[in-house]
Amino acid sequence: MKIVQRYRIFLALVFVNALLVMVNPEVGFASVENSLDNMNVIFMTLPPIFILLGLLDIWVPRETMIKLMGDNSGLKGIMVAFLLGSVAAGPLYAAFPIAGILLKKGCRIANILIFVGAWSTTKIPLILFEASSMGWKFMIARLIIDLPIIILIAHITERMTNDQEKAFIYENAAKCN
Amino acid sequence: MFTFGLYSVASMLLLVSFIKDRKKTSMAIKKAWKSFENILPLFLSIILIIGIGFSILSPIIISKLIGQQSGWIGIIIAAVIGSVTLIPGFVTFPLAASLLKNGAGLTQIIVFISTSMMVGVVTAPVELQYFGRKVTLLRNFLAFAFSFIVALILKAVLES
């Protein structure tokens, strides 16, 4: 029963999709196909990501991560965040569990948000793909414009979050992970 | 290709970890599984929402909505569509290229690309679990707003 409880939203959506198949088979089956495609991607890319997450959590000490991406990491922290996010693969929502581990390890919130921004827009496999469909000029120009904007978004978000809210986020991450 | 690289790195590190310390390695795997299982119901739900949404909103409908003559309204529609649909990156770009060919406007397409990459309305529940309400809202709102700026600059650069 506990499993049904945890998966209730998913089960409800399966039901909605089944209804869609009955009402409009064309759209319904397109949706099923779409979801299966995406699940394929998920189950292909997520295992190594989560293995890396597990290894990071167990092997890399908190002090190391604080030095790399903590409050006083400065430019180094920004660069490490971009690097971590850019070598990623997988959809954006896979970045959040990793962000959770980084929070637990005491990384600075702005740097974690840069990591999330990099994961969403400067992922290397993605930008190579972008160059092939939109052209190199488009890709390079977008990249140059996006880099400062990612940093800006991260820092504005951090600055608008007060200490109490930050403490809550860190506590929550320590609890969840 | 890239997935292959990811698997290689993960399995290599796993092997090194195993040689160095078996107990820690099994802890790491348990941790990996726990984190994965923890977030799996949300992931699966999101995939279905994307599947259903994407099948209803077909590319033909989208390119009609964000045509070259659609102006600011088209740009805003593009931003909203980009925000609520979570299309995998390797679909976004070919889709954007074909929308352009079908008569969508450049600014609209750039806004669509930016928001679809950075803004995640459907995935907000996952983000909320880790970042809480305020940071999630702020990050998504700022990403939404900045997408317009990206589009204006990028369009100017591309047309110069």
Image: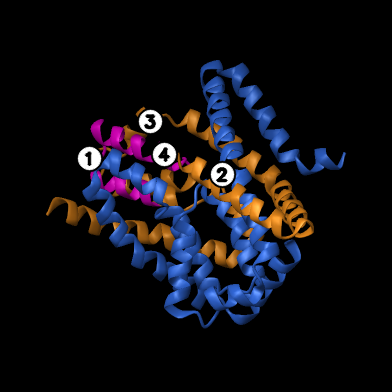
Q: Main secondary structure of the magenta part?
A: helix
Rendering coords of residue B130 (x, y %):
64, 61
Question: Mark 4 or mark 1, which has the lower sequence index?
Answer: 1
- Give amino acid for label 2: Tyr
- Give amino acid for label 1: Gln
Residue at label 4?
A: B90
Residue at label 2?
A: B7
Q: Which chain is orange?
A: B
In the image, A103: left or right of A37?
Answer: right
- Give amino acid for label 3: Pro
In the image, B127: left or right of B138?
Answer: right
Chain letter of the residue carrying label 4: B
- Give amino acid for label 4: Phe
Question: Mark 4 or mark 2, which has the lower sequence index?
Answer: 2
* Callout 3 and callout 1 share a chain: yes
B96 or B122, which is in the foreground?
Answer: B96
Q: Is residue A139 above or below residue B64?
A: below
Q: In which image quadrant can residue A118 be found?
A: bottom left
Q: Secondary structure at mark 2?
A: helix
Is residue A7 one of those drawn in magenta?
Answer: no
Tag nearer the camera, 4 or 2: 2
Q: Which chain is blue?
A: A
